[in-house]
Image (cartoon, coloured by chain):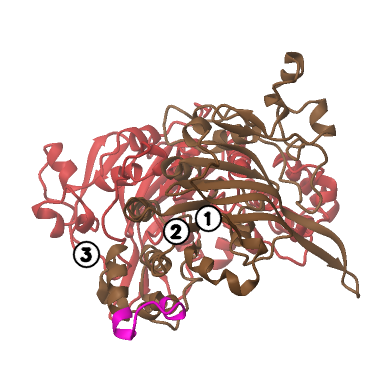
Chain colours: A red, B brown
Amino acid sequence: MSTPAAPSTCESAETVLDVRDLVTSFPGPNRRIAVVDGVDLTISRGETLALVGESGCGKSLTALSILRLVPKPGRIDRGTVRLGGRDLRALPVAELRRVRGHEISMIFQEPMTSLNPVVTVGKQVIEAIRLHERVSSALARRRALALFEQVGIPDPASRLDAFPHQLSGGMKQRVMIAMALAARPSVLIADEPTTALDVTIQGQILDLLREVRDLLGTAILLITHDLGIVNELADRVAVMYAGRLVEVGMRTDILSAPRHPYTQGLLRSMPARARRGERLTEIAGVVPPPGQWPTGCRFAPRCTRAFDPCARIDPGPTRLSANHTAWCHAVAREEGSPPAGGAPA
Amino acid sequence: MSKGGADALLRVVGLRTWFPIRAGVLQRTIGHVRAVDGVDLTVPSGRTLALVGESGCGKTTVGRSILRLVEPSGGRVCFEGVDLLALPKPALRPYRRAIQIVFQDPLGSLDPRMRIRDVVAEGMKAFRIGANERERTDRVAELLRRVQLDPTQMTRYPHELSGGQRQRVCIARALALGPKLLICDEAVSALDVSIQAQILNLLRDLQAELGLSYLFITHDLGVVRYLADRVSVMYLGQIVEDVATEALFADPQHPYTQALLSAVPSVDPGRRGVAVRLRGDVPSPANPPAGCRFHTRCPAVFERCRAEAPPLYPVREGESRCFLSDPAARPSARRPAGA
């Protein structure tokens, strides 16, 4: 299904987005709490990287930080976000506005709330086109029509004049994708793009995203909690827990040979994987809220393989192969590496 | 067939719930949304029936109609042999105790100003369970332990709990009244997968301990496969397939069920992409297509489907509302082109 066009090795010449040591914090009762805490990500042209985790793990905030759209009183404390050679964090706001939508754009979970309800969807797409290109409104309309066709909206000419409420959820998401692609960005961030949609419609949207990636070479940062969608679309997967990466690897590494106990637990707890009549394997306890994250490995209190250093020392990365890394003391021990981890932040 | 029989706790027969569409200054009824249009269901005692479908198919309305939280337009809802739709409202009271419902959004179904103890005890008080507040408090503690919550949580407010803990409270509240049937309307859909597993295990344990019956309303086929004994698949207000769970996953008969199963992304890295992809959207239940309601999206559609509405035909371990399962049809008519 996937094209062999894009090699997925990190730091290749094709890297379009490179995030290093990203830290985003919110004020807590006593001190600022780093809700995204030292995240590194790279995506190559035409590649799909899935950022996976449960609610509150910081995956959406990572995306918003990349675009510098962190809601107040949140703030980015540290890190670089290089897009096509420029650091987005260092750009003046006016220039950043040009980059957003033009070189990197984003679609959200709720297409209903992202569209203006009192403006026709055609006008909204035309506006997006003219924001980035000096074209006549007639030409922009033709471009909008072509975009609608491209994203598979049936009867596109009449749909241009429809208001958002006249379209189904799947159609609205197609409009959002058309708008996001208006300027042919090199990176598309898709935050739970199908979570609000029915499963038969979800499939249509996944097909569309795959087509976009293969046709235009758009790199996709896919944010999701659904490992099935990861399997459908992703080339590589980054798993987040409590603000940090815990495991990064190729799709097949993560889904068939995960090494981090959290990734393993996530896969085991899926009812679709369980045998009928068998108990599901639970991950004990609850995800601790930001600010109550334990010292050392943040997953340690829920981990069945936790041992001496886990509660004290942050686990550093253990390279398992060129593309597969896990942050876990137990994995490091299995691999024969010393348990000394990354420096506590 | 294990369907029906004397051991049925709940039998829904020909249930119809239509909502009027009103328009104009006089608010005249100009049509109906046929949310539920002739649904039959059976929940055997101590078993789990899953009612599956996509948004707008009417599955939630079925759940609400059973409890008469919305008034059905016709049909029968027989609980232990008594037709609830024929009862005057006051006579429903004991059944509103015996049938409890747990919703998707636990925060939305808990009063934010009530402490957990009062949330769970409220129904007991209404039904005069327990001699006094002290006795009810003891019972609340016992119920919280049963759903694996620490009784010290009793003094907390709903917003102080996590999503999974809140759903446990909702389950405890339902159990407080000693129900026989629990209707779970997308009860685990909003939860993260690791928490979902905890709640699903809890529901299984409770069924084994208390002999509860479940009507599990959901869109999540993974949950269905894990929990249900039998599955009814709903499309545009009607049941299109009703079979034992294993049969549904091993050999789905109705083209809609086949498409639904194939649309669920697998987590098996060796399996990617799908065999059947449905085109288009679900038509409006205010104006369902003539003939088979699924014919506008069906990959196996043929002439007869546009003209006639198919009844439920018997298939292996169940029923399917599709002419492809018509035993009387000539073999040539059963092999449509391009299927």
CA distance separating discs 2 and 1: 10 Å
Instruction: Kindly report which numbered mark, 3 or 2, lies closer to the viewer in this rendering.
Output: 2
Q: Give the answer, above or below, for where B89 lies relative to A102.
A: below
Front residue of B307 and B190: B307
Q: In what element is the residue under mark 3?
A: loop
Mark 1 closeness class: few <14, some 14–19, many ≥20 residues within 10 Å:
some
Q: Which residue in the protein does label 3 denote?
A: A294
Three-letter residue code for mark 1: Glu
Q: Which residue in the protein does label 1 denote?
A: B80
User: Are discs 1 and 3 less than 8 Å apart at CB?
Assistant: no
Say whether residue B74 is left or right of residue B229: right
Mark 3 closeness class: few <14, some 14–19, many ≥20 residues within 10 Å:
some
Q: Which residue in the protein does label 2 denote?
A: B180
User: Are discs 2 and 1 less than 8 Å apart at CB?
Assistant: yes
Mark 2 closeness class: few <14, some 14–19, many ≥20 residues within 10 Å:
many
Q: In which chain is the residue bearing label 3?
A: A
Residue A111 image offset from top left, x and y in percent:
63, 57
The segment highlighted magenta reads: B124-136
